[in-house]
Amino acid sequence: MTDAGRHPRIKVLTLSEVKDVSGHVGDFDVRIIKHARYVDESACTACGECAKVCPVVRPDEFNMGLSSRKAIYSPFPQAVPSAYAVNVDECLGHNPAVCAKCVEVCDKQCINFHMSDEEIHEKVGSIVVATGLSPYDPTINDEYGYTRFENVLTSLEFERLVNAGGPTGGEVIRPTDRKKPKRIGFIQCVGSRSAQKGGNYCSNICCMNTIKSTLVLKEHDPDCEVKVFYIDIRAFGKGFEDLYSRSRRLGVQYIRGLPGSVSETADKNLSVAVENTVSGKLEIHELDMLVLAVGLLPDPGTQKLQEMLGLQLTPDGFYLEAHPKLLPVDAATRGVFYAGCAEGPKDIKESVTQASAAAARAVRLMHKGQITSEPITSLVLEEHCKACGKCAEVCPYNAITVDVRKKIPAQVNTASCAGCGTCAAECPFGAIVMNHFTDGQILSQVDAMLAENARDKVVAFACNWCSYAGADYAGVSRLQYPANVRLIRTMCSGRVDEKFIWEAFAKGAPVVLVSGCHIGDCHYIDANHWTEKRVAKVHKKMEKLGIRAERLQLAWISAAEGARFAEVMRRMEKLRQQVTEAEIAFTKEILSKPKK
Amino acid sequence: MTEPTKNIQAAAPRIGVFVCHCGANIGKVVDVAAVAEAAGKMEGVVVAADIGYACSEPGQQEIKDYIAEHNLDRVVIGSCSPRLHEPTFRQMLISSGLNPYLLEMANLREQCSWVHMNDSEGATQKAMDLVRMAVSRASLLYALEEEILPLVKRTLVIGGGVAGIQAALDLADNGYEVVLVERKPSIGGTMAQLDKTFPTMDCSI
């Protein structure tokens, strides 16, 4: 921590939040809000005189509310930066009539109530997302009585209690009577591996964390009775099994079965009812203190950042890596890497390993000082351009300039163009060529697909980042669906031109699917809004022509939704079966007439 | 970059199609040899063959030999998802002296053999269609040149927990500027709250 704080090349911005990211790999523009600390970071020596006189007492969140702090405080002794901060919502305010005691006692005069939030702009070439975790709140697991019974703690609260730097100096005492507990229980998988409460995934760290806690307890007091209620113990890592057997050797009891209910006795002890699934018997255990081994959830800010950077999430809400085995720290967005629990629950060693890997990936990207950009960008054919401005309107990156008044043809700034192809799909004059995904190339795929037995096939367009990846994920998960669907990949669903859809119907396709990222998740900021509008437009035209609009479907499928992809394919096949020969013949005929 | 409209009408394409067995991954469900045979008859295809593992070193060498022998100018690979091995095969084209954007892949594994495991016939039909579509698209591909852009040698690390700190230190020690953004008044994250940590039982800070 201190190394990071004093490293000449690391600029640490605390009390800060990333508000906006624009640009692209190699050249991101980042807007950061640094909230006012009201204490001059560089001048403060953390002498603590200010806190002594501060009259406001609040629960200390670092100690999980097990102790108190003042409105001006240092989060913890080893904090970096080593400077106090004012929680302005709690402070009585800099009005001498009201308070300002801290200002009076500060010799260095580093408390300044005129500080305001600062907006900072940074230019960076790559981004590491390490937003961490949020511990599960077990209040809703009412059967365990957390918050109803004071001697039921979460694992993080217990962590502060046994910590030498914690509120009790590392002495384990019960919250109700401050006595040393002699009988302590741990309940595993609270908020993990549950279909009802919390996540249905394993949180990875709780087994070992509990084993560690049992060892610490036994070290403090070899005679104390320690019981662990569990489903199974996952001690899979290096050196883990050793700790587990050490814990058992020291007499910690491992009882297989999660308690059904916890009640409080008159002397504030806890009575735990559990079905021991080894003996098959119902057991009641009386304990002085109970610790809930809570699971890990993604940080609450995850979704906001996901939308800002165009990232993908797993169904659990953690960030989705570009490939689970081969690119485990890369995001699908080039230049963005993941480290730590942001990507999934992991312990310190794994977090550190992944962080080093993310750093190495970022170095690999940046070391040349330049990057090669994929030439999948759009190109304006000036002779066809009527300078109508539609392309510039739809471009999510403002990469197209066009002067509508002076009728100067559109121009693409290839450095800003990300290659979604929405401009090409929207251009009414066919004046934009989307390199590597040209009209001709895509139409030729449609034609080749429907050359024979068109009636039996489901035509599906899928965007590279979400739906096509979702289809791959269905494959990796071996989810089976009808074999008559044929996918055409485009970079973005925004590329799916009306004419591709008409071509498919004209060539006898019974049904057509356009699929892309969920609204808000588009890899190209919001290009899929245009997909939605375009499909609605085609639906209207279909109705006018007497073609059942239902035959064109739009579905949002994320990269993690393999099951949803398979389900959509089954639904498409059902729809296809309902389309009659006569309908197809009629459609082909009406679309073969000039001017649709 | 060549003007695309001109290129599309270039001389008749010389396409090679290579259908990968991926061991049993594709080969067990899809009749790979039949797909390769059907591909051989498609318009523009000069040579078609099935290959055990197209991505392996010997597999790539085999394809490179075909490219040289038949003077191929476009390549279609029927194998896994392009999201997996497109970079591999693009590199292979470069080493054969071809522009990497003259490659097209047909997804015969993730989107065919693995999802139609109990329908060999349907999967084989689909594989043929996917290859036909790829060949048709390949004949219209044209060379593209990558652009070199400047890059800012700085990294933004979002989150100052143990992962963010480690990433920031590694980057900074490698000579890169780092901006480390933390929401709370101090860096440290959850790690700072922990006492002894497993498996070594030492202090976390």
Image (cartoon, coloured by chain):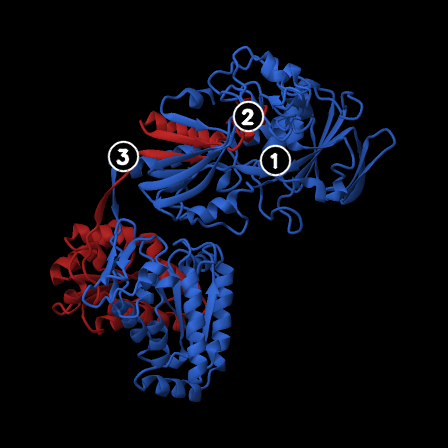
Chain colours: A blue, B red
Viewer-nearest of discs 1 and 3 = 3
Question: Residue A355's spot in the image, x, y percent?
Answer: 42, 34
Q: Are marks 2 and 3 on the same chain?
A: no
**Which residue lies under the disc numbered 3?**
A367
Q: In this view, does B9 lie above or below B159?
A: below
Q: Residues within 10 Å of mark 1 (few under 14, many from 20)?
A: many
Residue at (58% x, 46% y) in the render: A201
Residue B134 figure quarter: bottom left
Name the residue furthest front. Answer: A97
| Farthest top residue in view | A107
Pinpoint residue A94: horizontal percent, then vertical percent.
61, 23
In three-dimensional space, the C-alpha distance between marks 1 and 3, rounded to whole angstroms, equals 40 Å
Q: Give me the residue at 57% from left, 18% from top.
A: A77
Dot 2 amino acid type: Ala
Q: What element carries label 2?
A: helix
Write down the chain letter for disc 2.
B
Q: In which quarter of the image is residue A233?
A: top right
Q: Is residue A370 left or right of residue A17?
A: left
Q: In the depicted view, which residue is nearer to us: A180 or A150?
A: A150
Residue bearing the label numbered 2: B192
| Residue drawn at (49%, 49%) of the image | A313
Q: For mark 1, what is the residue?
A: A207
* Residue A453 appears anywhere in the view: no
